[in-house]
Image (cartoon, rainbow, N blue to C red):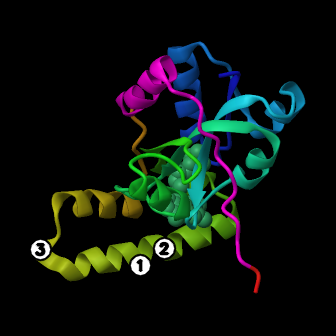
Amino acid sequence: MKAIVYTSKTGSTERYAQMLSKATGVPAYPAKEASKRLPRGSEVFYMGWLRAGSVSGLAGAMERYTIRGAAIVGISPAGNGDLWTEAKINGGFSDSGARLFYLRGGYAPDKLGRVDRLLMRFMANAVIKKIQAKGDAATEEERDMMGVFQNGGDLVQEEALADIVEWFRSGPHDGVLKATPTLDI
Ligand SMILES: Cc1cc2nc3c(=O)[nH]c(=O)nc-3n(C[C@H](O)[C@H](O)[C@H](O)COP(=O)(O)O)c2cc1C
């Protein structure tokens, strides 16, 4: 693997990328810097944060690099979005065979721009309402989630990288993450 390429808005994906770089010896670059340093087609591991179900920066990265694996960083406990749905169906792989992982980042409203902050607050309020409506039936995980949405929170854990570090060491690294073709009718 030539490099780890990442996007990060509030720093959690960046921290994961730096920890992964340290653990594997593979350099990590933010997407902008990577485009200057890495030749097109380079084999990379991509790490991007989830924004309304899409992995930020992934479409551009898929065009530019050979993505052997990717980590999706979001706040939901179990992961979400189209790519993670593919992974769940294919036992941890994209339809095209690239290895996929999900990591939990955090919620830091102070570090968001106005539009993202509003969007996120809207989503957070919806989740809070849903959990509150469950009353005593809400699970501990749901209560924790509500706390994160109410007060912000950091869910980054170095241990969560263990499977990714293992995959870097043992491979195989032969799948490629490709754009899913859309049907224009
Ligand atoms: C506008 C917006 C939309 C988001 N949408 C999702 C989402 O669909 N699913 C999810 O799990 N997390 C979502 N998040 C949470 C981020 O993915 C999470 O805060 C992540 O840790 C951000 O990574 P970063 O710290 O590297 O920027 C969203 C955050 C924002 C600001």
Q: Mark 3 and mark 1: span between their CA atoms? A: 17 Å
> Looking at the picture, how far across and down is residue 40, in whole percent?
86, 34
Horizontal side of residue 62 vs 120, given as left or right: right
CB of residue at label 2: within 8 Å of ligand 1? Answer: yes
Residue type at mark 2?
Met
User: Residue 163's spot in the image, x, y percent?
Assistant: 39, 30
Mark pair 2, 1: CA separation: 5 Å
The amino acid type, in three-letter code, at marker 3 is Ala
For label 2, the crowd category at 10 Å Cα-Cα, with few meaning under 14, some 14 to 19 and many 20 or more, is few
Label 1 C-beta lies within 8 Å of the nearest ligand 1 atom: no
Q: Which residue is mark 2?
A: 123
Task: Give the vertical position of 130 relative to 12 (above or below).
Answer: below
> Which amino acid does the dot numbered 1 rest on?
Ala
Viewer-nearest residue: 52 or 148: 52
- Mark 3 lies within 8 Å of ligand 1 (Cβ measured): no
The magenta stretch spans residue 180: yes
Q: Is residue 183 above or below residue 159?
A: below
Give, as a single range, the part of the protein colored magenta.
158-183
> Which disc, if any, is residue 137?
3
